[in-house]
Amino acid sequence: MPQAVVLGEALGAFLMEGVSVLVSSSDAGNRPALGRALGCRLSADRRMVTVYVAAVPCADLLAAIGQTGRIAVAVSKPSTHRSVQIKGQDARLVPCEADTADVIARKIDAFTEDVVGIGFTEALVRTLMDHDPADVVAVAFTPSGVFDQTPGPNAGNAIAP
Amino acid sequence: MTRPTNSNELTVDSIRDCLEGVIPAAIATSDADGTPNVSFLSQVHYVDSGRVALTYQFFNKTRANILANPIATVQLVDPATAVQYRLTLRYLHTETSGPLFESMKAKLAGIASHVGMQGVYHLLGADLYEVQRIEAVPGAALPPPVHKRGLLPAVRRSCEGMLACADLSELLDRALADLRDGFGIEHALVLMLDECAGRLYTVAAMGYSVSGVGSEVALGDGVIGVAARERTPIRVTHMTTDYAYSRAVRAGVADAGVDLPPVTEIPFPGLPEPHSQLAVPILAGPKLVGVLFVESPQEMRFCYDDEDALATVAAQLGAMILAFRQPGAPPEEQAEDGSVPADGTAAVIRHYAADDSVFIDHDYLIKGVAGAIFWKLARDYVRQGRTDFSNRELRLAPDIRLPDLAENLEARLILLQRRLAERCPFLGIEKTGRGRFRLIVQRPLALEDMA
């Protein structure tokens, strides 16, 4: 079991501000699963990441997480291409906090602002992120590795958390 | 609006609009131990209804994973409706050259410059994948865009229009006019292949301030040259300098005392900053005969469906070109010569044997096979007073170096005819029947052979 890592302040800030969040896992047969998250948050002690996904469109992803607990989360800012990937092995469903809807709303606003700035329409982004609030579930994990994902030859390299 | 949830019927054909690279796709893979990895894809390329190809640009984690565990999941977004699709893929193999590789490389160059990644995105290979499953992700959707133009009706009209043409010249002009009227395309060229020189020369143009007839593009140069070399459509959806045409620079050649022919380059007429370009090879039977090229100052002007439509138009064009190459009727009795007697000061026709380039009163006209044809016509006119000629005698003339019988003599004549019409008011070529034509001369000619 790899060492759990504590995310640094800069990375923590990017996690909150970075706007596009993709989540993957793999099932017991090592088949990869993928879904788009509505938002994410870092715990106050910076030892736990929580991602929020809509359960119906992410059924395969949640099933895989349920089987293996494996998770890889890519957080990126489309306007700058900056992207990091955070991996963990203990992902599990946790109850949503009371302010989950606010966290998601802020993330979607930030995502919308960022990609409208590079030429996409607000209607497109809002439709892409549209979801049923009752369908939202929270997946929490302890980061075990952080990787550079910005396009280029260094993508995939481990970086300091 | 709710999208259908029964997605059993989806094929790659159903989701081609998601494959233009407008919204980056995501890919999830897993290594042999099951550790997942998620990253972004700049391009998911359509291969056929059951396969896609992804760009291999760096040896990164995704790449290592698919070599160890060939199953991947890709998520795509329709840029118009925001519908998301999830594809289950199985890695097949990688191609590092050839048509698929070159068409992905060109498209990637456009995408890279569009997103500010020119010089970062670099194609090492085209990774081919079998698509095992496509699922529409449940969620909201915007209404699909309304298309003002139907590509299929435009293709039909274009093919029918070409069938009605009597000769190659009319065919080329008709094909371009139908691109404008049926497809709304404003800028287009037809180039023909000079097999010996490994170059393409422009025979017909639409939508440029200078026609550029006679301008040349080398095989492998720009989208036109790559489309010809690889015999595959090459399409670029954004402005990129990677596929700009290299313009021959002829600096520092002092002509004084050096017996070199002067510059014989006709400028390529293309748009200075095309944001969309599409070049489609024209094949006659198995042989490449030319390229149909269209471009636009607008981004994303040509998509997969446009590429298919123009490939169909090019196929019809190729079939018609082949039909026009069948030998014409034998020459008839000399037709009545209706030309005006040559009058005034003599025009100096200078010919350089090295490349068959021809200058009229020091202005460059044409070179190569078309230059050799003109030189023969001019000599026969001056020495024998002949004005009427047949294609057949040109094919048999020893001083015109036609590569083989399949060589498109008609296209050379059109090139010569159009260059004369643009450059030389007192000389012209006029068709007098199938496989026959007349040289119109309105000033005396003085010949200078620089052999």
Image: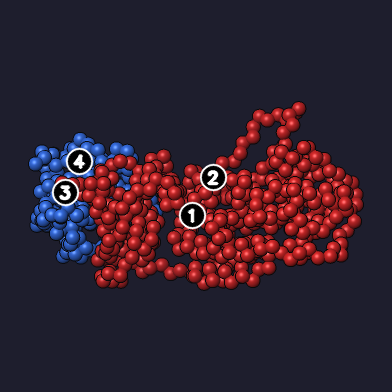
Chain colours: A blue, B red
Task: Indicate which label's residue lies in the foreground, 2 or 4.
Answer: 2
Q: Residues within 10 Å of mark 4 (few under 14, many from 20)?
A: many
Task: Indicate which label's residue lies in the foreground, 3 or 1.
Answer: 1
The reply to the same-chain question for discs 2 and 1 is yes
Question: Mark 2 = which residue?
Answer: B221
Residue occupying image coordinates x 18% and y 60%: A60
The reply to the same-chain question for discs 2 and 4 is no
Q: Secondary structure at mark 1?
A: loop
Marked residue chain, label 3: B
Residue occupying image coordinates x 74% and y 40%: B353
Residue occupying image coordinates x 59% and y 66%: B178
Q: Secondary structure at mark 3?
A: loop
* Label 2 vs 3, first from the N-terminus: 3
Marked residue chain, label 4: A
Query: Residue B232, which numbered label?
Result: 1
Task: Indicate which label's residue lies in the foreground, 2 or 1.
Answer: 1
Question: Mark 4 = which residue?
Answer: A146
The reply to the same-chain question for discs 2 and 3 is yes
Q: Residues within 10 Å of mark 1 (few under 14, many from 20)?
A: many
| Amino acid type indicated by mark 4 | Val
User: How far is mark 2 from mark 4, CA to CA?
Assistant: 43 Å
User: How far is mark 3 from mark 1, CA to CA?
Assistant: 39 Å
- Taking the image as shown, residue B169 lies to the left or right of residue B44, namely right
Query: Residue B34, which numbered label?
Result: 3
